[in-house]
Image (cartoon, helix red, strand yellow):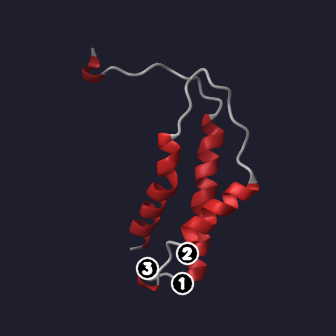
Amino acid sequence: MRIAITALLSLVLGGGAALAQSSPTAPAKAPLAKESRAARVAECMQLWDAATHMTKQEWARTCERIQTRLESLKIENMDLPKSGRRKKGGA
């Protein structure tokens, strides 16, 4: 059950990142400010419900862990070369 909840939180918190990708010519953005991190963790905390079978403290740790992982992904991928779109069908 915890795996399912963690996966759901990852999708919810990471969904905006997939839609907000910048163009290849755009300059790299600075690391996220702590205020916006706090806002994202607070948004995650609003999803908590007693029916999740996690305590509020466990949920808070999960929100923090997921946010840290999402930020790590963004920082690690900032220096990767941008490549063109891949063609479907192997041709």
Q: Residue at x 55, y 23 (%)?
A: 82
Q: Please identify the quarter of the rendering in which residue 78 is found.
A: top right
Give the number of the disc on residue 59.
2
How far apart are the two marked residues, 1 and 3, measured between alpha carbons? 8 Å
Q: Which residue is depicted at the point 43% across and 79% down?
A: 52
Q: Residue at x 65, y 62 (%)?
A: 39
Disc 1 target residue: 55
In the image, residue 26 sits, relative to residue 68, either above or below, namely above
Q: Nearer the viewer, residue 17 or 7?
A: 17
* Circle 1/circle 2 CB separation < 8 Å: yes
Instruction: Determine if residue 26 is in view.
Output: yes
* Residue that badge 3 annotates: 52
Closer-to-camera residue (84/19): 19
In the image, 19: left or right of 64? left
Q: Is mark 3 in CB contact (under 8 Å) with mark 2? A: yes
Mark 3 falls on what kind of element?
A: helix
